[in-house]
Image (tube, rainbow, N blue to C red):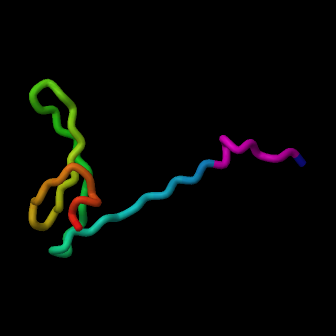
Amino acid sequence: MAQASKNSRTTSATQKFFCSCGGEIKMKTVFEQGKVKNLAECEKCKRTERRPSDFK
């Protein structure tokens, strides 16, 4: 039996981040001043940061 190549064995892992207020953090893409920016926003308190790890 043939082995599957390493490129076909990719796994899809998602990671959930939570704010200190208890809300879930979602990533959003915003077009601002001619640039595309990715922002992390808490659903509960509406706080925004550059990346999810900045909420700690």
Q: Position of residue 15 (x, y in %)?
A: 40, 61
Residue in front for this viewpoint, 12 or 39: 39
Name which residue lies at 18% across and 28% down: 35
Picture quadrant where residue 52 is located: bottom left
34 horizontally vs 3: left or right: left
Q: Position of residue 41 (x, y in %)?
A: 18, 56
Residue farthest right in this picture:
1
Q: Is residue 42 above or below residue 50?
A: below
Identify whether 1 is placed above or below 23: above
Q: Residue at x 70, y 44 (%)?
A: 6
Against 14, residue 56 (above or below) is below
Between 1 and 56, the residue placed more toward the observer is 56
**How many marks are shown on the rendered structure?**
0
* Residue name at image x 16 percent, y 62 percent: 43
Q: Quadrant of the C terminus?
A: bottom left
Query: Would you identify the image quadrant in which residue 37 lies?
Result: top left
Question: In the rendering, at what x and y percent does residue 20 appear?
Answer: 19, 73
Q: Residue pushed farthest top?
A: 34
Q: Which secondary structure type mostly characterizes the magenta part of the structure?
A: loop
Magenta part of the chain: 2-9
Image position of 16 with respect to 11: above or below: below
Q: Is residue 47 left or right of residue 14?
A: left
Q: Is residue 12 one of those drawn in magenta?
A: no
Q: Is 3 placed left or right of 31 in the picture?
A: right
Q: Is residue 7 magenta?
A: yes
